[in-house]
Image (cartoon, grey):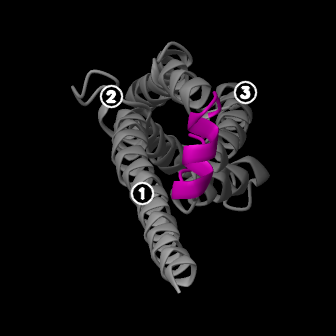
Amino acid sequence: MKIIHLTYERAVEMKNRAVAALLMLAMMFGGIYIGGRRSLGNRYDKVAGAFENGVLDDGYSIANDLEEIKAQAYNLCTIAKKFLPEDNAEIKAAENARAALMSAVGISDKYVKNYQLYEAVVALYADLKAEASFTGSQADMAKIAYGEIESRNDTIKNDGYNAAAKDFNDIRNGFPTAFIAALCGIKSAEYFS
């Protein structure tokens, strides 16, 4: 009888160890999930904020530059309508490209739409400059609008957002953070390219 009793105690002890081990594993994975989600999530939010508010959180951002580009493209189209025929293909192309940029979703999509708008604006401005009646203050205003679009696109090329996104992605895709990111559902940062 004593042998059976010792076996029963041993079985209870082993069961308790198994339950304790399972609880310890659950707590470890829970801690990894919560800590990883918080840490990587905060880093991801900082990168996403850099696109909207600037790398230094100072408002000098790609999003701000895109807003100014859209405004200046509108101004250029408005001026062009005074000098070019109503059915001018370049005006329509610039207006459509501007509308596409306004409805773009995602950072890489905004890059593509901005590039298309830039190409449309270059063609429109070339049409305007070829128009004989395109002189005076309207021509000066169009030159300013076009110059601002050029300037903002140059500024975007030197923005620190892509470097911040790369730094985040390097950390996110490293080991063991890639496992944690997959477990927590944290995606890579999009590049503006």
From mark 3 to mark 2, how far is it between C-alphas? 38 Å
Q: Position of residue 39 (x, y in %)?
A: 36, 40
| Residues in magenta, as a range | 173-190
Q: Quadrant of the C terminus?
A: top right
Is 20 in front, or is 58? 20
Q: Residue at (72%, 42%) from the top-left corner?
A: 116
Residue 185 versus residue 28: which sits nearer the camera? 28
For label 1, the crowd category at 10 Å Cα-Cα, with few meaning under 14, some 14 to 19 and many 20 or more, is: few
| Label 3: how many Cα within 10 Å (few below 14, some 14–19, many 20+) | few
**Residue situated furthest bottom in the rendering:** 1
**Label at residue 24:** 1
Residue 109 drawn at (x, y percent)? 66, 49
Task: Name the kind of residue labelled 3 in the image.
Answer: Ala
> At 56% from the left edge and 47% from the top edge, which residue is drawn?
181
Residue 176: x %, y % from top left: 60, 33
The stretch drawn in magenta includes residue 117 = no
